[in-house]
Amino acid sequence: MPTLFRELEAAGDGRRVALNDALAAIPFNADGLIPAIAQDADTNRVLMLAWMNRTAIETTLRDGYATYFSRSRNALWRKGETSGHLQSLVSAHLDCDGDALLLRVRQTGPACHTNRPACFYLRLSQSGLSVEGDAP
Amino acid sequence: MPTLFRELEAAGDGRRVALNDALAAIPFNADGLIPAIAQDADTNRVLMLAWMNRTAIETTLRDGYATYFSRSRNALWRKGETSGHLQSLVSAHLDCDGDALLLRVRQTGPACHTNRPACFYLRLSQSGLSVEGDAP
């Protein structure tokens, strides 16, 4: 775990770190990415998981809309830039060891590219996988 | 995107796939892992993000308690096996392209190793990182 995050384990409420120092401490993976969970800030529904590089995080914080790094297109991607299904940022949170992000957002339209409201529509259990909800 | 998940994009409610076929289609990363979000099934709070390999998924579904793969210890790890802070599985969900898991759980005690209720206590914004809530 990076030193900064180990140090913050015991930190009290309101302890602050400069943005550049925090971003520099994030242990991005070998591709320079960190997983980011998008959660609906009104319903608390988990909408999707995508990936961000440092520029995506900076862009998201600056613009107030979730911008991810598309691994398939190898490029930054403002969620909803073509569909209009933007995610307005409410708040962003790093986890205890700095290797995962949680974005609380207001989602315009469906979050999933299938036009379902959220991406996690495939229920997995010992009896197999089952689709929950019809495709729109 | 794996063929199975592309095919399920347009599938209707209740469409089923055998567990082995679903697990075989998951595009695990180069380390054989997939990110798994743990969410409190009662409050919908996002508790943490960890990683699973195929055996961790099978173990979790079979035993009914979240078992992850620890990248630092390079071993399966039943969450709470030493602390007692177990996660009883309520339901498991794959996302649209099969490369992320959402576990809805009942959490015993705090989810975070710092004894905070959840791991995402580091708020990130343009004005920097700030700790939310005192360390217990």
Image (cartoon, coloured by chain):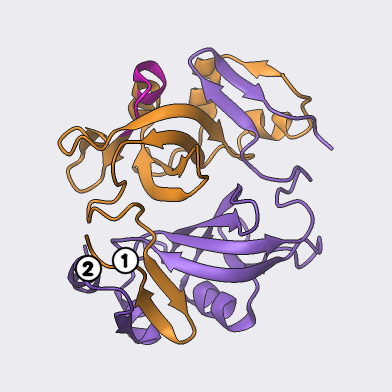
Chain colours: A orange, B purple
Among the 4 quarters of the image, the one containing residue B65 = bottom right
A7 part of magenta stretch: no
Residue A81 drawn at (x, y percent): 19, 32
A23 lies left or right of B16? right
The residue range painted magenta reads A60-67
**Labelled pair 2, 1 in contact (Cβ < 8 Å):** yes
A69 lies left or right of A92? left
Q: In this rendering, is residue B1 above or below B48?
A: below
Task: Give the quadrant of the N terminus of chain B.
Answer: bottom left
* Letter of the chain that mark 1 sits on in the rendering: B
Q: In this rendering, is residue B64 above or below A82?
A: below
Residue type beneath disc 1 = Pro
Residue type beneath disc 2 = Pro
Q: Which residue is mark 1?
A: B27
Q: In this rendering, is residue B63 above or below A5?
A: below
The numbered mark at residue B2 is: 2
Q: Secondary structure at mark 2?
A: loop
* Letter of the chain that mark 2 sits on in the rendering: B
Q: CA distance from mark 2 to mark 1?
A: 7 Å
Q: Are marks 2 and 1 on the same chain?
A: yes
Pointer 2: residues within 10 angstroms few (<14), some, or many (20+)? few
